[in-house]
Image: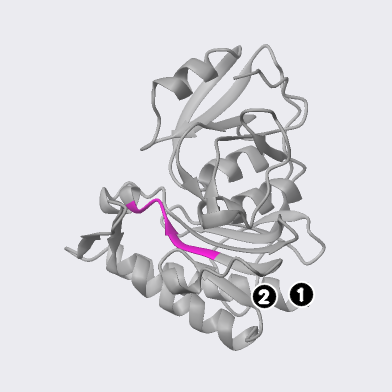
Amino acid sequence: MDHQKLVAVMREAALEAGAAIMEIYEADDFDVKVKSDDSPVTEADEAADALISARLRAAFPDMTLITEEQADSHDLSARTFLIVDPLDGTKEFIKRRGDFTVNIALVEDGVPVRGIVYAPAKGRLFYTKADGTSVEEAGPFDPNSPGRLDPISVATPDNDALRVVASKSHRGQATDDYINKYAHSDMKSAGSSLKFCLVATGEADLYPRLGRTMEWDTAAGDAVLRGAGGAMVRYDDHGAFTYGKDGFANGFFIAHAPGVTLMAP
């Protein structure tokens, strides 16, 4: 895989999809449907999916492509694949809260090695460079020419005063009970894969998720976090978190800065 080319294509695709999403987001109204799993999907999800899929397939025609919105693309046999959530945080999009993202990642042998997370309503763009290190690009964003790239890295945590980020729309009592096992000085809520990026930039130290997610929800944010020196582990035993699982369903997980003393379930 030509990682230099991949990063350029992912960036262009994410920005193009973000522009399409914002055009719909800023309209007076938009269509919302309910999928078979009772999750919502909008015309913005579908438009972004079509744009990203077309660009990735044109650039990497032989690469397996998995997207949330294309059920027939779910091929379990590939060890290397691109995985896309064209609009993560659809509930935040519908409520016009801004915490939604475009997510594209490359997975190799179960590990997300490159990824991009773009939050168009927030004006924030995070991705891994060709060498695997993570950056945040300063806007305004030109699809044809990257702007200033600021390296990002996780913070050195204070286990007596951790900064925690948790889901805005999917946070229950079990999550609160787990967070309360830690001594924390700050607690914030965020939607979509932005939570990974807040840990990656050092704005938070810990993000536990005790709820349903799919691999396309997490792969890009996980890649950005890893490229910033962070880690994502299984909730139950703190073992390695991998991708390419049967059905692409994730178990519970903890994303964190190294140095956080993880508590048992």
How packed mark 1 is, by other alpha carbons closer than 10 Å (few <14, some 14-19, many 20 or more), is few
Instruction: Return the residue nearer the eye: 200 or 35.
Output: 35
**Residue 179: percent from left, percent from top:** 53, 19
Q: Quadrant of residue 139?
A: bottom right
Instruction: Return the residue nearer the eye: 228 or 237.
Output: 237
Q: Quadrant of residue 114?
A: bottom right
The numbered mark at residue 258 is none
Residue pictured at 68% horizontal, 49% vertical: 242
41 with respect to 184 (left or right): left
Q: Which residue is mark 2?
A: 8
122 with respect to 131 (left or right): left
* Residue 89 included in the magenta stretch of the image: yes
What amino acid type should be assigned to the residue bearing mark 2? Ala
Q: Which residue is mark 1?
A: 4
Q: Quadrant of residue 253?
A: top right
Which SS does the magenta portion mostly show?
Answer: strand
How packed mark 2 is, by other alpha carbons closer than 10 Å (few <14, some 14-19, many 20 or more), is some
Image quarter in which the C terminus is found? top right
Instruction: Return the residue nearer the eye: 39 or 190.
Output: 39
Instruction: Return the residue nearer the eye: 184 or 107.
Output: 107
- Work out whether 188 lies above or below 45: above
Residue pictured at 69% horizontal, 74% vertical: 6
Task: Kindly indicate whether the residue at mark 1 contacts the one at mark 2 (C-beta within 8 angstroms).
Answer: yes
Residue pictured at 46% horizontal, 47% vertical: 192
Tell me where the magenta segment starts and ends, as one range. 84-90
Callout 2 secondary element: helix
**Residue 113: percent from left, percent from top:** 73, 59
- Way the structure is coloured: one colour
Residue pictured at 78% horizontal, 77% vertical: 2
